[in-house]
Amino acid sequence: MKLSGLLIALFVLPMFAWSQNDVQYYRPYDKRGANMFETPKSDMGVSGDFKVRVGANFAQQFQALDHENKADSVATSATDPTNKNKLIDLSNGFNLATANLNIDAQLGAGIRVNMITYLSARHHQEAWVKGGYIQFDELSFFNSDAVDRIMDNLTIKVGHYEVNYGDAHYRRSDNGAALYNPFVENLILDAFNTEIGSELIFQKNGLIAVGAITSGEIKGDVVALPDLKPEDVDDLSKKSPALVGKLGYDKQINDDLRFRLTGSTYYTASSRSNNIYGGDRAGSRYYLIMENTAAKTDANFYSGRLRPGYSDKVFSFMINPFIKYKGIEFFGTYENANGRTSAEKDMRNATQIAADLIFRFGKEENFYLAGRYNTVKAELAVQKVTTPTGIVEYFGDKNPVTINRIEISAGWFLNKNIMAKVAYIDQKYEKYPSININREGKFNGFMIEAVVGF
């Protein structure tokens, strides 16, 4: 065991005496957290005394996927003739087991501190802190009736936290935490990042309003950006914050019917390295799919997804309807994303549509069948390659590419803390240039996943 792992164990084990205590205003890490979005404005019947809750998530997959493409041979470099478009040979086997450590400390009535650590992830096999924040749902220390009335409907979050853009991030797998996701993988265009900032959430009679301002970066940074270079179209000495907004309605109409509809937006004028579409250090569940023979599990951790490379300027919006009638659920995503790098003059566009249909049945809806259709149409960044004849060719956003995925899954909650899933996946790549590794690419097969959360 590494020293860091030993220190974590020595710190955590004495705290398990508190591990079964729930805290106020939080989203449980077990089945109770499924179909929960923003944390509820309810103390959940828990006292406001000081307490610490320690929990964890674990996930393990068995992968049986095959892939193929019809891309032209492209040399790795001018001195290395290795074909970088040759796909790596895959076999059936187990993926890296992933784990999260969840710590929630209640510091007083309506005051909670959260920290999540990836103990093992695809991109970081060592322990790596995802983020941490403090959340206020009560401000009783002001001893003000007026403040108390405001906080009846308001939540304040400050720290390094998961950006609340869209609703899809509430249903995605986050490293070891996969109980909320009825499927094995996340969306093709996966909007997820942790950024430093503050967020206000207003909830009243079904109305939801969110406003946030963040750093627009995945990590803290106080170093001045370099001066403008000839190929840059922006003044990189400027750093702009990211602005996040959400407006929606979420109501349990009656015992059988729940309806939710939200619209969200994310905007940053300029960043050193924005990662709203590339901030997932846990990586894709599809290990090494559509990767070349030089690929590594940790370095090529976005297999099967699309990273548009909007590192400088980003403007995106997402619309998410959610309807649950008895055991039948529908969750939809419409997303339009625009962005560019500092070297690009024009914004590039990507459009995503996803539709999830889930049928839950059995005692306490412990079983489910689910289907997802996900499609993305995107303009690629201009790239330079060297062909076998030595000719340098470029391709980019003149002809948008398309990625289509169908995933059919079935799952079983053995109890509120243990879940098993099996899924069939079929994904195809269309309109990619002949010199791109994804040219007429496709992959399909089965995956099995076991998940624990508490």
Image (cartoon, grey):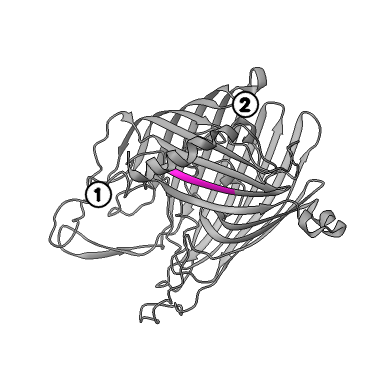
Q: Is residue 134 above or below residue 364?
A: below
Residue stretch in magenta: 114-118
Amino acid, disc 2: Phe
Q: Do the residues labelled 1 and 2 touch (CB within 8 Å)?
A: no
Give left or right: position of 86 versus 383. left
Residues 43 and 74: in front is: 43
Task: Give me the residue at 59% from left, 26% from top.
Answer: 416
Task: Give me the residue at 42% from left, 71% from top.
Answer: 344
Q: Is mark 1 on a helix, strand or loop?
A: loop
The residue indicated by pointer 2 is 359
Residue 301: image location, x then y, percent: 36, 47
The quadrant in which residue 78 appears is bottom left
The quadrant in which residue 28 appears is top right
Residue 351: image location, x then y, percent: 53, 54
In 3D space, how far apart are the residues under numbered discs 1 and 2 (Cα atoms)?
Answer: 40 Å
Which quadrant is the N terminus positioned in? Answer: top left
Residue 315: image location, x then y, percent: 56, 64
Mark seen at residue 85? 1
Residue 55: image location, x then y, percent: 54, 36
Amino acid, disc 1: Asn
- Counting residues from the start of the chain, the first of labels 1 and 2 encountered is 1
Prevailing SS of the magenta stretch: strand
Give left or right: position of 154 versus 285. right
Q: What element carries label 2?
A: strand
Residues 218 and 380: in front is: 218
Q: Is residue 42 above or below residue 78?
A: above
Using a 10 Å C-alpha cutoff, classify the residue at mark 1 as few (fewer than 14 neighbours), some (14 to 19) or many (20 or more).
Answer: many
Give left or right: position of 41 versus 114. right
Mark 1 or 2, closer to the camera: 2
